Image (tube, rainbow, N blue to C red):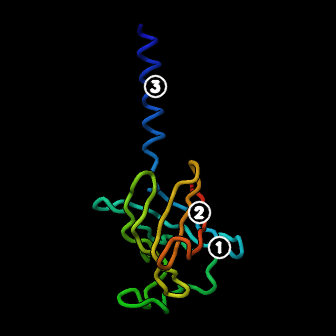
Amino acid sequence: MKNFLMTLAVTLTAVCTIQAQEIVGKWKTIDDNTGKEKSIVEIYEKGGKYYGKVIKLLNPSKPNPTCDNCEGDEKGKPIEGLVIIKGLEKKEGEYTGGKITDPESGKQYKCAAKLNGKDKLDVRGYVGFSLLGRTQTWIKAN
């Protein structure tokens, strides 16, 4: 009986851990045109929504690049430290309803994200409908 209860507890813990997987954490962004690693984005939860901040640029084209093409408060701010994902909400295993900013162009797009296994995150930026956009696969960073 003791062994059964121990096995049951371990199994339930494993199942809960698998179901509790979220996008929170550090992710390596990959340029979908070149295949090169671009940055580390840390996704965090605040007030029931999810946000992503660039915490490190991996191959910057110049020292301390800024978001020169961004609008509003983000214009001219350093890309490192910039919150590029805002307001994602978790619904049925997917994260939708947010916005993502491309720091190179300064353009903002609607955003959706979905875990692809335990160490990949598919992040989609789009205009209007989800069909009109592109997806990048980010890799979990250690």
Q: In this orientation, which residue lies closer to the viewer: 122 or 142?
A: 122
Residue positioned most to the right: 34
Q: Disc number at residue 10?
A: 3
Check disc 3 and report its element: helix, strand or loop. Answer: helix
Check disc 1 and report its element: helix, strand or loop. Answer: loop
13 vs 63: above or below:
above
Q: Disc number at residue 42?
A: none
3 or 1: tag closer to the N-terminus: 3
Q: Residue at x 54, y 61 (%)?
A: 27
Q: Quarter of the image holding residue 57?
A: bottom right
Residue 140, given in percent of the width and then of the height, sits at: 57, 56
Residue 6, given in percent of the width and then of the height, sits at: 43, 17
Q: CA distance from mark 3 to mark 1?
A: 39 Å
Amino acid type shown at disc 1:
Asp
3 vs 114: above or below:
above
Amino acid type shown at disc 2:
Trp
Q: Mark 3–mark 1 contact, CB under 8 Å?
A: no
Q: CA distance from mark 2 to mark 3?
A: 30 Å
Amino acid type shown at disc 3:
Val
Within-10-Å neighbours for mark 3: few <14, some 14–19, many 20+:
few
Q: Disc number at residue 31?
A: 1
* Residue linked to disc 2: 138
